[in-house]
Amino acid sequence: MSIKVFIDNTEYDAEIGQTILEVARKHLIEIPALCWQPQLLPYGACRLCIVEVKGERRPVTSCSYQIVKEIEVLTKTAEILRMRKNLLSLLLSNHPADCMTCEKSGDCLLEKYAYEYGIRKPAFLGERNKVCEKDGKPFIIRDYEKCIMCGKCVRVCEEIAGANAIDFGWRGFGVQIVSGFDGSLKDNGCFFCGNCIEVCPVGALREISAEKKGRTWEFRKINTICPYCGVGCGIQVSVKDNSIVKINALPDGSVNKGWLCVKGKFGFEYVKSPDRLKKPLLKKDKKAGKFMEISWDEALDLIVNRFSEIRKKYGANALAGLASAKCTNEENYLFQKFFRQIIRTNNIDHCARLCHAPSVAALSQTLGSGAMTNSLDEIENCSDCIVLIGSNVSETQPVTSYKIRKAVSRGAKLIVIDPQEIEMAKIAEIYIQPWFGSDVMLLNALAKIILQENLINKEFIEQRVENFEEYQNWMNNFSLLEAEKITGISVEMMKRVAKIYATSKASIIIWAMGITQHITGTDNVFALSNLALLTGQIGRPGAGLAPLRGQNNVQGACDMGALPDFFPGYQKVENPEIREKFKNFWNAACLAEKNGLTVVEIFSSIHQGQIKGLYIMGENPLVSDPDISYVQEAIKKLEFLVVQDIFLTQTAKYADLILPSACSFEKEGTFTNTERMVQKVNRCVEPPQDAKPDWEILKNLAKRFGFDWDYHSIWDITREINKLVPIYAGITPERLLYASLQWPCSDEKHSGTSTLHIGKFPAGKGKLKCVEYRYPYELPDEKYPFILTTGRVLTEYHTRTMTARVDGLDQLSGEPFCLMNENDLKKMKLKHGSKIKVISRRGEIEIKVKKSRSVPEKTVFIPFHYAEAAANILTHHNLDPVAKIPEYKICAVRIEKL
Amino acid sequence: MKIKNSSELKNYYENLIIKTSKREKRTIVLSMGTCGIARGASDILNSIKKEVRKRKLHNRVEIRVTGCHGFCEVEPFLIIYPQGIFYCKLQPADVRQILMESIEKNNIIERLLYTDEKGKKIIKETDIPFYKKQMRLLLGSNRFIDPANIDDYIAQGGYQSLSYVLGNMQPEEVIEEIKKSGLRGRGGGGFPTGRKWELCRRAPEFPKYVICNADEGDPGAYMDRGLLEANPHSIIEGMIIGAYAIGSNYGYVYVRNEYPLAIHHLNIALQQARDYGFLGDDIMGKDFYFDIEMVKGGGAFVCGESTALIASIEGKPGEPRAKYIHTVEAGLYGKPTNINNVETWANVPLVIKNGWQRYSKIGTETSKGTKIFSLVGKIKNSGLIEVPMGITLKQIVFDIGGGIANSKRFKAIQTGGPSGGCLPEAHLDLPVDFDSLSEAGSMMGSGGMIVMDEDTCMVDVARYFVNFLKEESCGKCVPCREGLSAMFEILTRITEGNGKHEDMDLLEEISFAMKNGSLCALGTTASNPVFSTLKYFRDEYIAHIEKKRCPAGVCKNLVHYEIMSDACRGCGACLKICPVSAIQGEKKKPHSIDDTKCIRCGECFEVCKFSAVRRK
């Protein structure tokens, strides 16, 4: 509801509950404030934002004063100004006046206000707080002599990151920021998200990386998108002399609302790594694995020759390509176009196969679209019940976890379902720990309870769901007691979960690899989709199904048709009309008619001698794919392997030809994040030497094949996408300059879609699926009594090609490790930090063990990032029959002491 | 044994009265609050027990240990009932005589009686002028109550207000009653209690909490301690009534850990109240659950502030928060919370018992009822006093307090704890109520009153309180954290003789910023000692700064001692007592002080019988 407010005798409109400061800032009325941060709860400590409100006895702090009725506010009376000046003077009395050497100068709020209020010399020069620098290694300088105790760092650590690594110690004049018992950040639970630096108004918290590199006015600042996970955080990159100095979060209008995680904030050192590939490399000596530098002309000619040879000899389907979830939409578009138009095969896939293929497969069938149905902001602001299942979100998408945390503090109920007691379980209303691989059973049980207790949404089912009766009949035979036995969760508890989920105003289910990386991955997603359809928890803001995407542009790579069965925009390859459309547009003689092969199928086809040539753009299957020895054997059998990457990856070592490409800081284009938001990527620095953006490489290659791809800039490709992909039709380069847009966006007037499936599903009606429970492929037995489950950790990314080259990240988690339950360690007489051997039927690795309480007994968790102790040596490559995803989450292993 | 309804309580009460009236034993009442114990009451108690045993008086005498009655100045004391004989300033050796003369026989021991100013011996406690001018509605029953025995409280009519409320009144009616009575919060804020309850009751969320703020931290103030130690059930009863009116089932008493005896008594009282069915399920047969948990504070002064107190109960650092949402709407664990001070809660049964009409007759237009003060400092009769609102400061200081000790001149009275102001003689006619004191630049606060005589340096006093508050500031908001530190430095510099004229302006600037800009009441009132002394005793500041002199002779750097040779008889007393051998002189010849050696301890000044030592 709107309400009138008079600020300095001018009338403004305000919402009830808004604070005076919010209204003032909105209308650009300057009120100074040091402890205020729009995304945090009001704190009222610096007192600079005091204003006079008619009728109040004393001045009030505008940051905490909520407007509930019409008021008159005066922000600049003589008394107020006098008081502010006094306060600033007091603060400056206890602050080193070393602005001329301070890193923060130019960006410091205290400096700014001192200037504005004309304080040349503080009036009360006296005792100073004697706090010295504290340990914030490897990323943060904690120069507390400059600290003004605004408490923003403490609050962001608690309210947003949830790390609670710092707090106020002591009191009164002696108050200090401490971590633990005043120790280092590293030892006291800090996640190094760096958000404390983001909010520090003075120079007390700074980036180690930016020290002595110059001050704010010396940097060129470019806004772009973070290269790491699927959240797609907006970042501002400060550049000096073609080098990235530091990265800050973009506050307004970005997905991340001013927050970052450790990788986004600090993980950019790899860009300038000496290991970067700078020239095309040709393998000279296959045995010794030596490469020699060649020119681009030579390199491209070689590809043309070898690929043409193979095609001539074995046919087009003897060639395959792996696209990249790290490359831009435009590049993935060109990559699939290259294979479809020029090579004429559909053998294109990428690592989405290994993460959300089941989500896409299942949701396409039940709803008609495989993407996340809601935006991340809806989780933060609209969802009343959040079911987090099989997603260690605080490790894998930290910024999403901030949003969930905010939702919980708003009053939303969080239900965490995970065999591992993940960080988010701490703030959950309910945490349940089902046994590995029992998801279908558990989810069916929830559905059964929803039916049994009549928690269904009848109206919704009648209007928007088909085969309800069939489903209901099928459910008749389902036994809750059996579910209790298999999942290990009591019926009582399942009832509580079902009730909260079904009866909340808006419920959302968030999942990730814990659901999909199973041989029952597709079934798991079917079962989730059933819950949403039964209760009508979909198609409204805050209600829906949210598969969290892993990589920065994995959504985009899928959207762009880097898939064996889809043209860009999920247009079926096997549909002749669609094929005709692309054929005509691309002016192609013909296009392959059959679906191509998926990632894992490509490798088995190599084994079977059907695929002879492979083009890998920015992927590293030799670490990321299951059963590595199998993949390795396959790769060795290839006649010709091209790897296009920014580093000499484990896979590239086996390549016949390596092409150096530019990383995301060195090119333009678009990324599509987990919530379907298409965002513009901007060039911040120049690529090293001869490295080129992937799209340029592909364009040049096409030319050598005799195809005149007439793209003058990357935006010409975007325009082509606009024309060919209906869901991207309105997402034009011109619009992306000013705003990010969520697909589907049908034309240039369409403002994008935050919530999918409002009123209607693309598939018409939603389909309930009867899914029978199946056991995982390989369960522990006497010989291999432990379950191995793989996953990711916060400070590492994918196959560590980037993170291993960031010194600080390497310091935090450079060494491979596994987690085991402390009781198992005790039983096996193992110590925290001792080395063990983990052995499966496929292979064995040696690895350090860490004590954990979150991992259940008889379980080993190994992050898959590390090539030197690759978890995927142990995993098996049996697939989900529909989505062809391997079961990374469960295999049987045994542990040997070393 | 549970008392299940009002008629059971009535029967129980009547039986107690009958039992008491039939009792033939004498009762020795011994005041053993923390103050009494500090003055040696434990030794007296032991002697009494020993003597009773020795003289086999078990059948003739009963001992009742009570909390403080108020007159701390003359402790340890005892009263013998039924006659009401009051013996004070006792030594353990006096006990034997008391038992021989006053218990075994019916004699009165003159020398142990209280002597008034005119030298008249007074037998009965109630006739002592200190008590006579008071109105002891809350403290009056202390002498009849052993705090560890709930029956004593019930025999005084205890829990009958609760019984009446639960039997006859709707929650809204209770609130109305409290509102009409005009009861205002005794913790210092003076917020109308009934209004607060109403807001809390109306807040839509559940559960609701009621809290008793017993974190009494003002130096020199011990009203709440007195009540907690002497009559804990009055507080508990008040809280139960409040909880019923508000619709709360959970209560907390937040008491400072430095009050071990209060904690002990409160623990006993809570358990007894549970045993009798006043706490727990189905109180007095009504479908009403309420229980109270005690939380001990860790010693931070600021935790007396309501939001800091809540944070502390929640296990968070005790820091106030910005009150953009009132605690009555979102307090403890984010739920509606009603916090009242100890004395406020103790007043509640009284209001119900007497009815609002009678209660509101006491006091002034805006401040109703009585108020307990702890009267300390350079006063003859220090102790806890309870007076009707509106009484003047002069009446308190001179009629009840008996004037200034050691025939010195009155200089100032500081009211309201460390953040109160110091009022000069000219303000002695001020009526003591919430509003008048604030207008004069001080405050009623929770009820501390410190009397200062001519030997007190007001700059030093301001510095003392600022130092206290500086130590106790939580450090959250800028004006309080930085302002107190800056003020302390300036005041120190003045008392050391290094003050500059601008310092007074600086002090005023900081006071201004703190008063208007601080987050909580600690900060907004912290400048009161400075502000009020600057206002009323500016000449002392000027003397320190301009003349480098401390008129009261307190600030050591500004004091010089010299021996006037014409008055000195050369007795050598000063020479002997001087701890640093700064005094020389031959016997029977005038002595002299070496100013460079002198440490200004003032011993020579005190010891000289001929007033030959002069302080400049």
Image: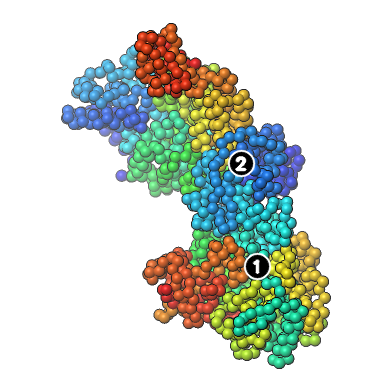
Chain to which mark 2 belongs: A
Considering the image in quadrants, where does the N terminus of chain B appear? top left
- Residue A657: give x, y in percent of width and height: 68, 80
Front: mark 1 or 2: 1
| Label at residue B296 | none
Considering every residue shown, the one lying at the far bottom of the view is A313
Compare residues B192 and B64 and report the one nearer the observer.
B64
Q: Residues within 10 Å of mark 2 (few under 14, many from 20)?
A: some
Q: Is residue A455 above or below residue B112?
A: below
Considering every residue shown, the one lying at the far top of the view is B566
Picture residue at 55% right of the left edge, 69% below the top: A792
Of helix, strand and loop, which one carries label 1? loop
Q: What residue would you read off at disc 2?
A: A95
Picture residue at 66% right of the left edge, 70% below the top: A276
Q: How many marks?
A: 2
Q: Amino acid at mark 2?
A: His
Chain to which mark 1 belongs: A
* Residue A348 visible at all: no
Looking at marks 1 and 2 on the same chain, the residue that comes earlier in the sequence is marked by 2
Q: Is residue B451 above or below residue A44?
A: above
In space, the residues marked 1 and 2 are separated at their CA atoms by 41 Å
Q: Is residue A64 left or right of residue A335?
A: left
Q: Amino acid at mark 1?
A: Pro
Compare residues B328 and B295 and report the one nearer the observer.
B295
